[in-house]
Image (cartoon, grey):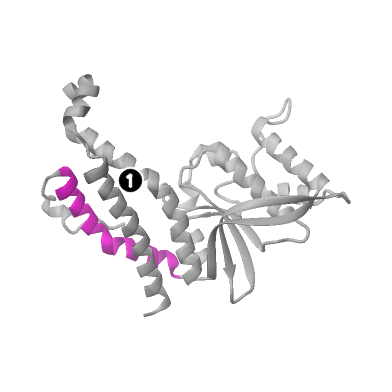
Amino acid sequence: MTEKQEMKKAIQSVIKMMMDRVMNKVLVEEPFVKEEHRAKKPLYAALVPDEIFKGSHFERRFVTPFGGVWEKLAIVAANNGLGHGEKGKTITGKVNAERLRRIQEVLNNLEHGIKDKKRIKPDWDNELKYILEGKNTKLIPVTVISDVYAEDKKNKKKYAFELKAPLPNSDQTKVSKEKMLKLYSMEPLQVDGAFYALPYNPFGKRENYSWAFPARWFDMKNDEVVLIGDEFWEKIGGLGTYKAFIEAINEIGADYKNRIYREFLGIEPPPEKLEEGKL
């Protein structure tokens, strides 16, 4: 079995484990009970078919656990690609006091703007340059907990990734940026790179990414420390990782779709859906 085949199997194992938990939850632990739904929301039930709310019942129990799955999939990619990955790694180093002050200054300016001026647009390169120019002999211990940490065993490189859902909120992104700026300010550096990563792009191409909240903190279209979709998977797992990821999901997608039709919705899949399920 090749490395990419091993990665594909490992990816499928993570997805199957999550999907089996979801199916158990919606079929056994927390099934949709139409009588209960009608009693709690009689107006909704009078106007909208039960099947619509049954679908949203499933969606809530599917979307929430998927947040933690992205990190597990990233670890799989790192272990099979770069060589090593781990979740929630604690990275400790020292940052001089002036750099820490400048980090807060940069974040405050992005959040609140400067008096009598338009809101400042994020510019990672210039922000980091300004922060690193800060000089102070007082070194302060700083700890950063990375969402995903990976080591390139072949090239002896270490990377930290702030991995967020494709549509992250502003507060999450601010925290991620602060952590990344601290990592790049450590003396000596503890990682060779830190990145803000999204597992896929709901807008298609990078130049079309238009979710406003993270754009308050990063230039999502141009900052090199921002990785979206295939850029992230190729970085952490090597060339071909994104393709292997898509193939792995497509191979098992149709089976789960058909199970959801039959076991949860209680209907036969439409003929055109029997073979669908591909990304």
Q: Farthest bottom residue? A: 1
Q: Would you identify the image quadrant in which residue 8 lies?
A: bottom left
Residue at x 77%, y 61% (from the top left corner): 188
Considering the image in quadrants, where does the C terminus appear? bottom left
Decide whether residue 247 is among the magenta residues: yes
Where does residue 254 sit, x and y in percent of width and height? 22, 58
Task: Indicate left or right for 133 with 23 as reference.
Answer: right
Number of residues whose C-alpha sits closer than 10 Å to that of mark 1, classed few (under 14), some (14–19) or many (20 or more): some
Prevailing secondary structure of the magenta residues? helix
Q: Is residue 71 above or below residue 116?
A: below
| Boundaries of the magenta span | 240-265
Residue 200 seen in the current view: no
**Residue 42 at what x, y percent from top left?**
20, 20
Compared across the picture, whether 269 is left or right of 67 comes to: left
Q: Amino acid at mark 1?
A: Phe
Residue placed furthest toward the right? 137
x and y, in percent, of residue 172 in the image: 55, 41
Whether residue 4 is in magenta: the answer is no
- Assign a secondary structure to mark 1: helix
